[in-house]
Amino acid sequence: MKILLIEDHKMVATSLKMSLEKENAISVDIINNFSSSEIDGIILNYDLLLIDINLTGIEGTINGLDLAEELIEKYKNIKIVILTAYKLDFYIKRAKKIGCKGFISKEEETNRLIQHIKNIVLEDKTIFPEENHMLEPLTKCELNIVRLYSNGMSRKQLAKELNTNVRSLAVSLSRIYQKLGVKNYQEMIDKVRELGYVDSF
């Protein structure tokens, strides 16, 4: 299987190439600093393209999803997987919508990544994570706020526990509500229980 890795971080790209090529059936070429015309000239030589989301190319900053969409429109049968650290719902949904074959985290274990690649290339499967139902994942600090708040603390008690003031806490809660897509305390509690955050503590 011939893979083209489009990744502007050279150390990441080299490490990934070495990991994937431990599988004898896989060979990986890398493009770090590229132009669309350069890709056009070689794209049909590959069984799969692995594309990062945030890319810096000759033409400036490039969104990997925009690039993937452009290539899929031009080459209908091309197989593209988004390989990224940004596991956000709206990225996953867009990757599905434009026709990518997968959306895989850079934190995935090498053996699982290789198996995903085989499934996509050889069996024409699609590999996507379950959606988080959030715009962004909660930070450790935000998870701590959710845990304490779900235990029935008032905002004043919670602010004291976190050694902050009520106004700053309100800003943090507003951010949490935004990430979870909820409007009030009860919706937040229902959502974090649904997602398993409360039960995980």
Image: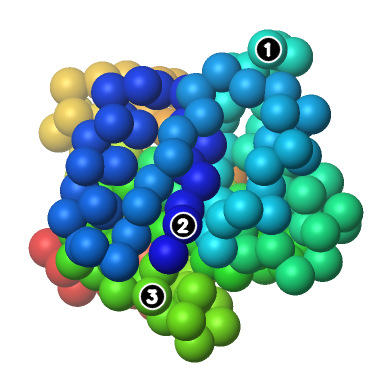
Q: Which of the marked residues, 3 or 2, is nearer the chain's N terminus?
A: 2
Image quarter where the C terminus lies is bottom left
Q: Nearer the viewer, mark 3 or mark 2?
A: 2
Q: Nearer the viewer, mark 2 or mark 1?
A: 2
Q: In the image, what residue type sits under mark 3?
A: Lys
The residue indicated by pointer 2 is 2
Image quarter where the N terminus lies is bottom left
* Residue 149 seen in render: no
Q: Nearer the viewer, residue 39 or 95?
A: 39
Label 2: how many residues lie within 10 Å, few (<14), some (14-19) or many (20+)? some
The residue indicated by pointer 1 is 58
Q: In the image, what residue type sits under mark 1?
A: Ile
Q: Is residue 105 left or right of residue 4?
A: left
Q: Is residue 132 left or right of residue 111?
A: right
Q: Residue at x 36, y 52 (%)?
A: 27
User: Against 164, is 15 above or below?
Assistant: below
Q: CA distance from mark 2 to mark 1?
A: 24 Å
The residue indicated by pointer 3 is 118
Tell me where residue 146 appears, x and y as whole percent.
Answer: 30, 51
Q: Which mark is residue 155?
A: none
Tell me where residue 105 appears, x and y as whole percent.
Answer: 37, 53
Tell me where residue 43 appears, x and y as whole percent.
Answer: 67, 47
Tell me where residue 181 appears, x and y as whole percent.
Answer: 59, 56
